[in-house]
Amino acid sequence: MMTFFWSVTIMLPAKMSAHGANLPPGFIESLMADSLNPTSMCMDKEGRMFLAQKDGRILVMRNPGQLASHPLVTIATDVTNERGLQGIALHPDFPDSAYIYAFYAIPTLGRNRVSRFIVLGDLVVPGSERVIIELDPMTGTVHNGGALAFGPQDRMLYISTGEAGKGLNSQDTSNVLGKILRLHPDGSIPESNPFYHRFTGKNRAIYAMGFRNPFSMTFDQVSGLLYVCDVGSGFFEEINIIYPGKNYGWPLIEGNRTTQQEPVDYQDPLYTYPHGAGCAIVGAAFYQPTQEVFPDSLLNHFFFADYCNGTMYHIDPANVGAGALVFATEIHRPLAMLTGSDGSFYYLAREGQGGGSQEDNKVSTDGTLWRIQYTGNGKPYVSVNPHDEFLSVGEEAMFSIKVLGEAPIQYQWYLNDELVTGAVDDSLVIDSVTLNMSGSKCIASLQTVLHQILHPLLCCWSLRIHVLSSISICH
């Protein structure tokens, strides 16, 4: 039987693992869930998380790292290209008003809908769906928008809608595409909306217009202002503060206005960055927890990310001129983020292949949920454990671990009790496994050097390689 042994000692820096983020000193992250097909998420006051999946499922996580055995609900949805279940949000009085809201593409109808469902425990009450609003027919399968948020002061439901791949929709007041909508939680339209007395029908819900694909949004809980991230076309990504009745320019203007003819009631974005630095702005979250854990310098900062370059940024709304600062890098296709009441920070990553093609946008199971915590000068911390490998003959085996903390880290790997020369990273790769390697045991232990004394950081892991022939079935 072939045995693999590895150990880690605190000596020299090592690069991060393939799918984890590169974080500032003092921050650690833990893998909360994998095998996801994520689009968005929300959290209740008790810390229970709801994870929206593109295929229509809403997953529940009551305890960190432990998904419920069944989804809260599975909504029938169209998953063509960028369509699917997009945004979710909880009623501001949840669980007293036990409603969860969902933005999703209606199968066969080519349009999006927002509905609310009654939540009982970790399940939706069967038959409890109530349609809040149905949007206009989509002219394409892209640019859905789909973010949902409740105002902290007016307690209204805000909905972001994309222009469905047709820019003129954003300036057309006869439809609700390329807009921010504002509704009462029951779906009725407030008379205080800026166009209530000018428009008719569902168009009275229009609160602001001129957006391309407002993929994410969130409220500043202090000021009550709504921040929207609008994905650009060929030039700029935008962060916009939403004011009633304002026009944000698309497709007439992308980024800040220069010499373009501005539409009536035009509003420039708060912040932009050019393509080359990224290509699709995603995620929107303020660091405003009930229990502050991060350094004071991050309090009330707005966090966002770029889907293409895998970087998470933060910006101080009180000092936008200072620009956006990098918080984390090497995230594989970030999508959504939120701040937990306990001061932790969570983000979803789609993982898998990238590029934005229709093939990339298909339903997958590569996505992950991560929790970021602050430990200051804490000891090294294992955020991703190694695991068994199930492989076919000829495939590559990779054992990896992710260790975070203040101290620099050096990795050492042993194969059959022999040090593997040059294996100093956080992964051990076996290029091509053979059938006779099936059942090979991998023993993983982790040690740290603190004050010149060797200490175990965590207990050992006992792992195995399972090799299947090309016609075998894994039971």
Image (cartoon, rainbow, N blue to C red):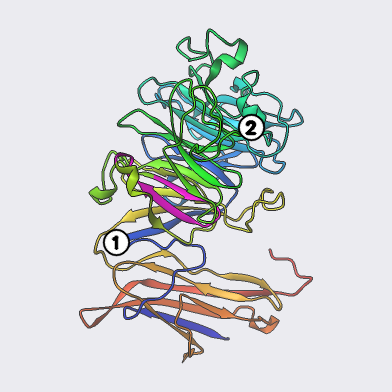
Position of residue 66 measured from the top left corner of the image (x, y, whole percent): 47, 50
Residue 51 visible, this orientation: no
Q: Nearer the viewer, residue 217 or 429?
A: 217
**Residue in view at x 27 percent, y 67 percent:** 379
- Magenta range: 303-318
Q: In the picture shown, does residue 273 fall above or below 125? A: below
Q: Secondary structure at mark 2?
A: loop
Q: Quadrant of residue 316?
A: top left
In this image, 137 relative to 205: left or right?
right
Question: Where 324 sits versus 105, above or below?
Answer: below
In the depicted view, which residue is nearer to us: 437 or 269?
269
Q: Tell me, for residue 154, which label it has, or none.
A: none
Is label 1 in a helix, a strand or a loop? loop
Q: Amino acid at mark 2?
A: Glu
Please say whether residue 357 is one of the residues in the magenta stretch. no
Query: Left of 2 or right of it: where is 137?
Result: right
x then y, percent, for residue 153:
35, 22
Q: Residue at x 30, y 31 (%)?
A: 222
Location of the N terminus (image quadrant): bottom right
Residue wearing tag 1: 26
Which residue is the site of mark 2? Answer: 163
Q: Quadrant of the C terminus?
A: bottom right
Q: Nearer the viewer, residue 206 or 121?
A: 206
Q: Marks 2 and 1, Cα distance to the nearest angstrom?
A: 42 Å
View extreme (front): residue: 259
Where is residue 59 drawn, in percent x and y? Answer: 54, 42
Q: Give the residue type that dot 1 points to.
A: Gly
Residue 98 point in image, percent of width and height: 46, 25
Neighbor class of circle 2 (other Cα within 10 Å; few <14, some 14-19, many 20+) is many
